[in-house]
Amino acid sequence: MAAPPLHPDLRAARFFPRSVTGPRRLRALRLATRLAPRLRERPGVEVVPLDGGATLRVHRPAAVPGPAPALLWVHGGGMVLGSAATEDDLCRRWADELGVVVASPDYRLAPEHPYPAPLEDCWEALTWLVDRPEVDASRVVVGGASAGGGLAAGLALLARERGVDLALQLLVYPMLDDRTGARTDVDARPLRLWSPGSNRFGWRCYLGGLSGDAVPAPAAPARAEDLSGLPPAWVGVGTLDLFHDEDVVYARRLRAAGVPCELEVVEGAYHGFDVVQRGAGVSRDFLAAQTAALRSALGT
């Protein structure tokens, strides 16, 4: 049986690897991330130290009368890689285009800092943002891509538990379910950049010694039994993404629990397609859908 086809705009991805992350590559990938030219300091980015040792990169819009809406945007990287600085261009774009304060936490990474450290770093960043006098606390969104989307979904669960109201959770191909790594029915042929092996490695690093019923819902949001009372959601994922099934199920469960949820499924799109091939038409459309969801939720 032939593998499902890539989207016509993404045909170059047939030459891409199925996986880029694993225990043998982690050190080299982290070094490459730190040395990447786009991580050079940019003017206009405020770096705020957080109590737990993490930092927060803050992008403020041009003069906005009165308190502004805000977005906490969490970077991806499988819980083991990445930096908030890699999100500077996107965060600055949303800050300028939507007139919102955008903050992105440089949370501590696994395996050196397993759950709950990364999530609590993000929570500290969220509370810092909500408490700012220049932020309208009634219009705050949490969002992220891949592992960042999983952390954003975990933040939404914590916010419900800890009494913080959110306007939206923007979940871009989020990493939600550690149990996906145990599936034996996954066709890995069409996958790109994030494989079942990568997924098992990322979850193993993040969860430390936790497994089975000991995994709490904020760590793996798909394990949450009750999704009622969560903020509205936007969930986007490609059909050739390992996370497709878990993301679609989560979106449907949100709707069943009475949570408004918009689900955007992109035919023939792989994990991270919009970052790797950001100039493709389908990638621009995907970003436009996210921006429209933000604009609607924040009333900008």
Image: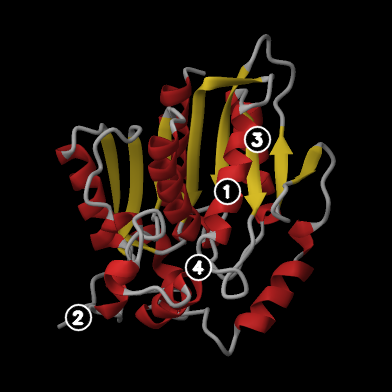
| Disc 4 element | loop
What mark, if any, has residue 204 been given in the picture? none
Under mark 2, the amino acid is Ala
Q: How crowded is mark 2: few (under 14 residues within 10 Å), some or many (20 or more)?
A: few
- Name which of mark 1 and mark 4 comes first in the sequence: 4
Judged by depth in the image, the label closer to the viewer, 4 or 2, is 4
Residue furthest to the top: 65
Name the spot of residue 144 as percent of width and height, x first.
49, 49
| Distance from Cα at disc 2 to Cα at disc 1 | 42 Å
- The residue positioned 81% from the left and 36% from the top of the image is 44
Residue in view at x 66 percent, y 59 percent: 83
Residue 278 visible in the current orientation: no
Task: Measuring from the top left, give residue 116's x and y in whole percent.
Answer: 51, 60
Please tell me in which quadrant of the rendered image residue 285 appears.
top left
Nearer mark to the viewer, of 2 and 1? 1
**Dots 1, 4 in contact, CB < 8 A:** no
**Dot 4 corresponds to which residue?**
78
Q: Is label 3 in contact with label 4 (beta carbons under 8 Å)?
A: no
Quarter holding residue 194: bottom left
- Disc 1 target residue: 122
Label 2 sits on residue: 2
